[in-house]
Amino acid sequence: DAKTTQPTSMDCAEGRAANLPCNHSTISGNEYVYWYRQIHSQGPQYIIHGLKNNETNEMASLIITEDRKSSTLILPHATLRDTAVYYCIVRVGFGNEKLTFGTGTRLTIIP
Amino acid sequence: ETGVTQTPRHLVMGMTNKKSLKCEQHLGHNAMYWYKQSAKKPLELMFVYSYEKLSINESVPSRFSPECPNSSHLFLHLHTLQPEDSALYLCASSLGQGGTGELFFGEGSRLTVL
């Protein structure tokens, strides 16, 4: 699976949009971009995933660049409960069982 | 509530003890995983079971022994552990083939080895 690069940490004011970047310049054509988050001492939680089109669900939006070498996770109205470590992961399609986590971005929402 | 339940949530054991961690899911998933998360380190994949068969073993020491008796239950048997094995052990499940690739994680079992 391709490697990703994320900033170590970010701050965001409560109520503002949190934009978390991820670089995956070596992504292959059949690899998807997944985002998970881990709130302190809990298991990771799936947020969203996409292949090449932008995606939106009730939690977040995922913007993938046209060349697919980078993406941005957007939390539209951040709350204090969004404080967590956010992981960007690329992996081959749905049949691949291996999900490899990196160090992620520690997002802190400031009141 | 993810539908994946892990017990116990906390476990303290000596280096000579034998204990087991249990994971249970009733989501109809066909793949189950064990991950290890040590302090200030990324999650490390340990084992993957697919349709009750071990499909991935990430060169885990033999003092960790997984067992998947059916598609709903996963165990991690522990024996003669070392203090550096102290960590949060996370279980996850996924639909496997035909699914979206989403993993559902339990809350984890925090293990302390004395």
Image (tube, coloured by chain):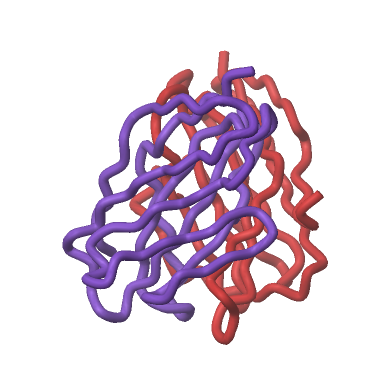
Chain colours: A purple, B red
Left or right: where B8 falls relative to B64: right
Residue plotted at (65% across, 51% down) = B105
* Residue B99 in sight: yes
Left or right: where A9 falls relative to B80: left
Residue plotted at (59% across, 80% down) = B99
Question: Above or below — where is B113 with respect to A65?
Answer: above
Q: Position of residue A53 (x, y in %)?
A: 42, 76
Question: Above or below — where is B83 with respect to B94?
Answer: above
Q: Position of residue B78 (x, y in %)?
A: 59, 38
Q: Position of residue B93 (x, y in %)?
A: 64, 62
Left or right: where A25 falls relative to B23: left
Q: Nearer the viewer, residue A77 or B63?
A: A77
The C terminus of chain A, quarter of image: top right
Q: Nearer the viewer, residue A4 or B98?
A: A4
Residue plotted at (23% across, 67% down) = A27
How many marks the image carries: the answer is: 0
* Residue B18 in sight: no
Q: Nearer the viewer, residue A98 or A106?
A: A106
Q: Residue furthest left?
A: A26
Q: Residue furthest top?
A: B114
The N terminus of chain A, quarter of image: bottom left
Q: Residue furthest front?
A: A16
Q: Residue furthest bottom?
A: B98
Location of residue A9 (image quadrant): top left
Q: Position of residue B27 (x, y in %)?
A: 78, 69
Left or right: where B87 falls relative to A1: right
Residue plotted at (54% across, 40% down) = A17
